[in-house]
Image (spheres, coloured by chain):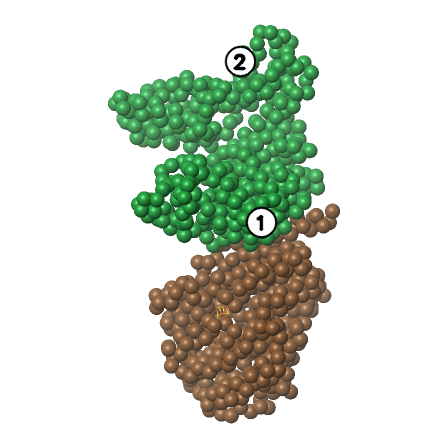
Chain colours: A brown, B green
Amino acid sequence: MAIAATDVSKDRSQARQKRMIADHFDKLEHAKETGKKVVYTFVPGNLTELIDALGMLPVLPEINALQSGMRKKSAEYIAEAEKAGHSEDVCTYVKCDIGMLKSGNVSPTGTRLPPPDLLLLSYTGCFTFMKWFELLKQEYNCPVVMLHVPYQADGMITDEMRRYIVDQLEQVVIPAMEQVAGKKLDMQELEKRLALSAKAEDDLVAVWESARHRPSPIDGYFGGVYYIGPIFSAFRGTEDAVHYYRELREEVTARMATGEGPTTPDGPTTNEKFRIVVEGPPNWTHFYDFWRMFSREGATVVASTYTRVGGLYDLGFRHDSRRPLETLADYCLGCYTNMNLPSRIDLIEQYIKRYDADGFLINSVKSCNSFSVGQLLVLRELEKRTGVPGGFVESDLVDPRYFGKANIDNRLQSYFQMLEGKKRKGAQ
Amino acid sequence: MKCVVGIDLGSTTTKAVLLDERGSVLGQGITNSRSNYAVASSVARDEALTAARFTMLERAFESDQRMGSVETQTLLERLAACFRLEVYLAQLEQLGRVMELLLAGDQYGRHRSETEAPARDILAECIRDAPQLFVPGARRKSDFFRDLAGAAFMAGAERRAREGQVVFERIVALFDRAIFDVETWLMNVEFATLLSRALDRALPDVITDSVRSDVRDEIKAIVDRVATVPIEECSYVGTGYGRQTLPFPKEAVRSEILCHGRGAHRVFPGTRSVLDIGGQDTKALQVDDSGMVTAFQMNDRCAAGCGRYLGYIADELNIGLHELGPLALQSTKVVKINSTCTVFAGAELRERLSLGQRREDILAALHRSILTRAMSLIARSGGIRNEFTFTGGVCKNPMATKVLGELVAEHYGSDIVIHTHPDSIYMGALGAALFALDDLQAGRARLMLAQEKGIAS
Ligand code: SF4
């Protein structure tokens, strides 16, 4: 999510993020020489603090995939994977990752990615994740460790669920990680990182909250994917992340004071016309086109569920250094796609009201069942509850074949004009 | 006379609707979209302007006391037909001029002499036979110049080719090149001139000797006045597929989804749900009591279930699109088509025919298949609320409306009122015109850029 192409904004925080990412990929490229062990893992429920406390380096295949999408490499990678026999219906993140691996495993910054020493599956809510690592295991022949995360079927996290995860962490996951790392976990190191996580999380929540201001100084979806870069990937629990979020919060606060809107691909904006909540991941191959379809119409996204995939801090969750394993358990259990449909509807309803949105839009992506399931039901129910009109477009994560630019543009324009009509009518 | 204009630039046809300041429809026009959007808009708009003048004529006739003894409807009908004849003749003349020019060009060289005379003769025949096309009760397959002139010209060319007088391909190629120019040639012949010629033709048919001569003069005076009263176009809104390329500023462009909803609601004010099946897309929308769209869905990743599906099937069977519905209505046995993909359905059709299944039954199944898809789109947009309006090209297909009626009753109950309208092709342009009227009333009216640039006549 930390996007390499930073032409969008010349903010200091942005420059820092870019440096952080470049450093990280550098470290990865030299992992063999420096003796660092490499862990491949996924964004939802990631155990970054634990990985870092054991002195290992994470690689996040989903983020590589989305970066490949943005760099227009995904079509070629997907074709590569399909040539190797992967069906058209497989999640395109997976195919993009497999294709990238088969094409030399070059990272988004152009460095080479090392093979994994461990495949750490710390969130099992999406079945695809398991299949994905099965495939990677065949390629790399390294150990896989799996943390089974129960679904919040009843809309809550129970003590039993938490206990179940902590048991797995103590008995399976941490011992396996220790073995690969070649050292014992130092609890104090973990606690130190968890405390840093919470600090950054506080600032991130303040950034999300700024969208309540009019005009919103941030775009909580297109801009938001930049903001979640550090915290959902390799940097949570680091000093770097704390600095990044401090700086970001300052920049946002400054924009709020001057009445400036978010920075878009076409520069800073001031003309907020519509406030939108978005559900579903963005499309990465046409990210800027998609963004412009909003910014051109004066539409700012004030909140999105996608930017909560790696943690719902705005609902109050913080990593808690006083109960390290329980807090990691809560984190894994609490990610957005692990919530049942009623809770997801409640959450979006809350966003629509809290951020005083004019509308909400669902981008239903072909690849991702975790997100797409029940979206039409979500749409109807939200319209009923809030009276705010919902819009619906369909695309994909990183397969450019599923982004019909003219169609999506047409839907969006119609949708915004519909909102405009509603506003005019309300004003009369 | 002040008016507002809505233009719907569709993928196959371009429609224009003119409203007066009170929002009553003055006129509507339609033309092939071709590739030149600015020209298509202008042609459709010109047609709408002509229709508007006829509406004004009707109003003037009806409000004139002295017209009591005249059958005004007959007069208007005759006048309209004669006017169309005059336009057709003017276009034929233009066609002749363009052909001459083309023949004078280098590429005809030695073929010029053998092509020129027959072409001139055929054209003279077309002109001679033209009035028959417009006599009362005459059936024309289409009112598009290309179709009318094409049919007449081809008949002449074929006959001469059979008799060995011309090389058919050569003369047809000449026609094809020339017709394009004529279609894009905007009628800069004075409306008033054409109308007065038309009146001269029409009057003897309608006005018997028993009608007093002062009434005759009165008719002439009214026609003269209406033909020349300035029509001021005060506001435009454009919509449709080509709407980004319409010669309008961005502010004067409205999404076709909104326009269709508004138009359907205007024609049937009880409308709350709308299904529009056009050639290239299907839309399901919900509107509120003022005609504003509140929710919509369109087919997104796949074009199965659009009107083109039926077009493709008609091509496969080598029959006209309008014959599909009536044929399907003759079905006696229910068969099921599994494929919703247009191309695969074509393959399934062929296979079933080869297995000996009846064409009528397969066609009925194909109709059910496309409407079942539409039903799921409707469900996604929020279902059907009373009343329900069906628009778009496919609503003219009797089998489609029948199947839709059955499906609606099955899923939403039999008390849903379903509307279709013969002019439903104009719904988008009508909605656009209503938005233009809003703009005019709110003081943010926009004018067609082409008008300023002098593209439009
Ligand atoms: S299906 Fe969705 S949640 Fe699962 S791996 Fe693909 S993108 Fe991620």
**Which residue is painted at 62% across and 69% down in the image?**
A343
Q: Nearer the viewer, residue A231 or A31?
A: A231
Same chain for marks 2 and 1?
yes
Q: Residue B203, percent across and down? A: 56, 13
Determine which residue is flagged by label 2.
B205
**Numbered disc in front, either 2 or 1:** 1
Which of pointers 2 and 1 lies earlier in the amino acid sequence? 2
Q: Position of residue B61 (x, y in %)?
A: 64, 19
Secondary structure beneath dot 2 equals helix
In the image, B274 versus B120, the foreground residue is B274
Drawn side of residue A332 relative to residue A322, left or right? left
Q: Position of residue A405 (x, y in %)?
A: 50, 54
Residue sitting at x 54%, y 29%: B47
**Image quadrant occupied by the N terminus of chain B:** top right
When the figure is inspected, residue B357 is found, relative to residue A229, above or below; the finding is above
Question: Mark 1 sits on what residue?
Answer: B412
- The amino acid marked with disc number 1 is Tyr
